Image (cartoon, rainbow, N blue to C red):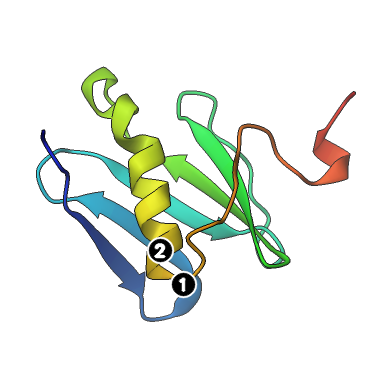
Amino acid sequence: MNHNVFLLVKDPNDACRDIIRSRDTDLKIMVYCLNEVDFKPHPEEIQLYADDRGNLLAFETINISAEDALDIASAIQWYARYIGYPEMEILPEDPRSEYNFD
């Protein structure tokens, strides 16, 4: 079984702009704190969301390729364990009410 190793690139000037990287593939995912930034999703990328104990997060791929798409959930689960919240739920839609049109 192949296990990816993920790394975290921290922005020294912004604690809310982490990048999750795969050591063995080209997968890169930008992490945004939705409570602190004006996040506008890029239509050609994949976005997933989560609630980190009241801090809403967006995860957006960077130049996603088809072969890396299956590893996105694993990378976000790794990040959840890294931040000490392994039970963090990954959401397919933006949890902010102004972006839900139901």
> Quarter of the image containing the N terminus?
top left
Relative to 54, say whether 19 is above or below: above
> Quarter of the image containing the C terminus?
top right
The residue most toward the bottom is 12
Q: Which residue is mark 1?
A: 84
Q: Is residue 99 left or right of residue 67?
A: right
Q: Does the rendering let one see residue 62?
A: no
CB atoms at circles 1 and 2 under 8 Å apart? yes
For the point 63% across and 42% down, the residue is: 40
* Whole-number angstrom distance, CA of label 1 to CA of label 2: 5 Å
Give the percent coordinates (x, y) of residue 72: 37, 37
Q: In the rendering, which numbered label is found on residue 44?
A: none
Give the percent coordinates (x, y) of residue 74: 34, 42
The answer to which image quadrant residue 80 occupies is bottom left
Relative to 89, say whether 83 is above or below: below
Which is nearer the eye, 87 or 58? 87
Which is nearer the eye, 17 or 84? 84
Q: Which residue is mark 2?
A: 81
The answer to which image quadrant residue 11 occupies is bottom left
For the point 40% across and 63% down, the residue is: 81
Relative to 61, say whether 52 is above or below: below
Instruction: Rate crowding at label 2 as few (under 14), some (14 to 19) or many (20 or more) other CA atoms within 10 Å.
Output: few
Which is nearer the eye, 40 or 3? 3
Q: Is residue 76 left or right of residue 52?
A: left
Residue type indicated by callout 1: Gly
